[in-house]
Image: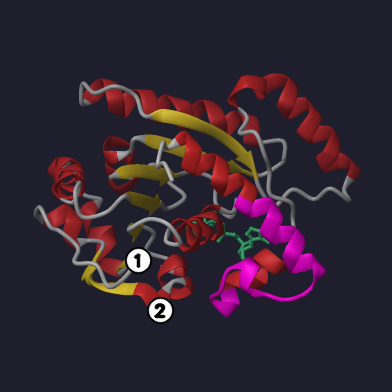
Amino acid sequence: MKTLAVMNEKGGVGKTSLVAHAGWYLAERFRTLVIDLDQQANLTATLGAHLGRVDSVELFVQVTRVPDVGRLTVTRSTRDLLGVEGVDRTCIATFRDSLAAMAADYDVCVIDTPPALTNRTFGALLAADAVLAPIGINDYSIQGVAELLRAIKGVARHYRRPEPLFLGLLPSIFDRKSRRERQLFESLAGQAGRLLFPGLLAKRDAYARAASDREPVWAMTGSAAREASLEIRGVLATVAVRLELGR
Ligand SMILES: Nc1ncnc2c1ncn2[C@@H]1O[C@H](COP(=O)(O)OP(=O)(O)OP(=O)(O)O)[C@@H](O)[C@H]1O
Ligand SMILES: [Mg+2]
């Protein structure tokens, strides 16, 4: 099983939207597990049709396997997730061990994290083979990036493991019509060049609609949805290749 953590301490940058689409997309070809670690439970709502019998919090409490409910299986976010944010950090390693116990059960696991550097985020980083970081295009995005990279390195060093593969910063909700955003994107590309993911997600109504309609943009009709579909499937195809999922 290959594990991808989607993270950014910043809120509202498109993490959950990306994880939902990654779940739908990867499940076309792979046995896919999606873990919602955000107590806001947006992903749990969007992927509600695929909920398994295990709540995400259980993976932190004791080593737990999630029985699949089909090609796509989702663990439910509950408010109890806040309970793992105490000083006792053993839950971080327990989460890693839960995922290790499912190595043969799934081909791929995608983790949605809350917009904060919490024990849950550290657990995701500890379990991850790869990390993808959606970012907003604004003045603060570069500052947040340094913090994010520090967290990735810090967790690897603390737990004496190799760093996960950093798939890159994925500009998300990018408003091409805004001159300011286009300029900021250029300056971001200049400063973060090598760290940028080869692709981006534009700001499109179809993505917002996908979340509330609980279906991927490629299930929708119309040319706007078709454009969104090509865009995000292109991004996800690259992610699948970088995760070396094969087929
Ligand atoms: N490319 C996009 N274009 C337009 N709207 C988008 C796009 N991506 C996400 N959205 C919408 O923007 C809002 C924030 O997106 P999302 O919930 O995915 O971000 P997030 O990073 O998970 O937020 P949080 O940090 O609060 O968990 C949602 O209403 C979502 O539907
Ligand atoms: Mg989210």
| Mark 2 vs mark 1, CA separation in Å | 12 Å
Q: How many neighbours does mark 1 have within 10 angstroms: few (below 14), some (14-19), or many (20 or more)?
A: some
* Residue that extends furthest to the left in the rendered view of this protein: 62
- Dot 2 or dot 1: first in sequence order is 2
Specify whether residue 150 is painted magenta. no
Q: Please tell me which residue is depicted at 80% across the width and 29% down the height of the picture.
A: 186
Residue type indicated by callout 2: Ala
Mark 2, secondary structure of its residue: helix
Q: Can you identify the residue that label 2 sits on?
A: 49
Label 2 with label 1: CB-CB less than 8 Å: no
Mark 1, secondary structure of its residue: loop
Q: Quadrant of the N terminus?
A: top left
Residue type indicated by callout 1: Arg
Q: Please tell me which residue is depicted at 20% across the width and 43% down the height of the picture.
A: 96
Q: How many neighbours does mark 2 have within 10 angstroms: few (below 14), some (14-19), or many (20 or more)?
A: few
* Residue that extends furthest to the front in the rendered view of this protein: 247
| Image: magenta residue range | 212-233
The percent position of residue 114, horizontal first and vertical second, equals 42, 53
Q: Can you identify the residue that label 1 sits on?
A: 71
- Nearest the camera: 204 or 32? 32
Give me the disc on residue 57. none
Seen in the picture, residue 53 relative to 200 is either above or below; the reply is below
- Rendering colour mode: secondary structure
**Is residue 76 shown to the viewer in this render?**
no
The percent position of residue 47, horizontal first and vertical second, equals 44, 71
The percent position of residue 67, horizontal first and vertical second, equals 19, 67
Prevailing secondary structure of the magenta residues:
helix
The percent position of residue 219, horizontal first and vertical second, equals 62, 73
